[in-house]
Image: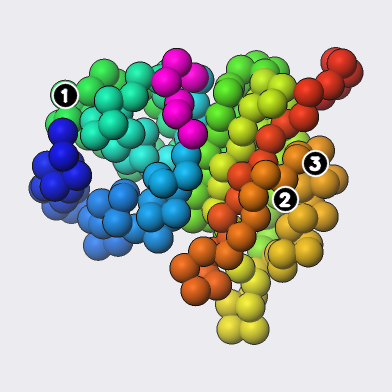
Amino acid sequence: MSDKEFKSLHVSFLKKHNAIKWFLVSPFEGLRGRWFFPIVPNVNGMNVLDLCGAYGAFGAYLQATKGLKFNYTCLDANRHIIGLGPAYFKEFGLKEPNFIIHNIKKPLPFEVGEFDMIWLFGWCDPLFDCNRLFKEIHKVLRPNGMFIFSMAVSTADYKTRYTESELRKLLKETRFIVDSLSVIDHSKDFGVIVRKKFSVSSTD
């Protein structure tokens, strides 16, 4: 399927379901998608977890347009939005992934080392306990598993919790190895790729 065909199905489906305007942007055209899709490693055969993934647009795009085959779990707290997921995947002729309704402020409902890769895009909450969440993500990643996320940059007019130095400190505290941490699209978002280090310790 071409990008054009994907976009047409994506927009018509979400219009039919009265989605809010910014959801109508095709995943490969949005801020995070323009950064993510060129850099995401080949996920064929992997177990992938998409946190706060709504109806699974990022996973659907990789499967529908790139022909990638991977075990995809999409988690979100919004029952209505995640409820669109099965019909959304059917629109592209894709197998329905594992959709889970869950709030990431609570412990993640997965086994230790269950996932090869975890995504988390376009989120920011100054009051959120990122230290706890990142430790949860670290726990459910396999050794050398990859965590790819974006986070809004803290600026004078958009005050969030983390500057770059604070974010690097958080990642060190939560035992991640930083592969890449850069600012994307005119200082609006950090784009981050980190890994869980190999360890002989059972606590990792």
Instruction: Specify whether residue 44 is painted magenta.
Output: yes
Q: Residue at x 61, y 45 (%)?
A: 193
Q: Which mark is residue 75?
A: none
Identify the residue position indicated by label 3 in the image: 174
Identity, as a three-letter code, of the amino acid under mark 1: Gly
Identify the residue position indicated by label 2 in the image: 129
Q: Residue at x 78, y 23 (%)?
A: 198
Q: Residue furthest bottom?
A: 156
> Looking at the image, is mark 2 or mark 1 nearer the viewer?
1
Alpha-carbon neighbours of circle 2 within 10 Å: few (<14), some, or many (≥20)?
few
Identify the residue position indicated by label 1 in the image: 93
> Looking at the image, is mark 3 or mark 2 nearer the viewer?
3
* Cα–Cα gap, marks 3 and 2: 12 Å
Q: Are marks 3 and 2 in contact (CB under 8 Å)?
A: no
Alpha-carbon neighbours of circle 1 within 10 Å: few (<14), some, or many (≥20)?
few
Q: Could you tell which of marks 3 and 2 lies nearer the N-terminus?
A: 2
Alpha-carbon neighbours of circle 3 within 10 Å: few (<14), some, or many (≥20)?
many
Q: Residue at x 38, y 55 (%)?
A: 34
* Dominant secondary-structure state across the stretch colored magenta: loop
- The percent coordinates of residue 151 (x first, y second) are 58, 58
Q: Secondary structure at mark 2?
A: loop
Q: Could you tell which of marks 2 and 1 lies nearer the N-terminus?
A: 1
Quadrant into which the C terminus falls? top right
Magenta range is 41-46
Which of 42 and 192 lies nearest the eye of the viewer? 42
Which of 76 and 41 lies nearest the eye of the viewer? 41
Image vertical order of residue 130 relative to residue 87, above or below: below
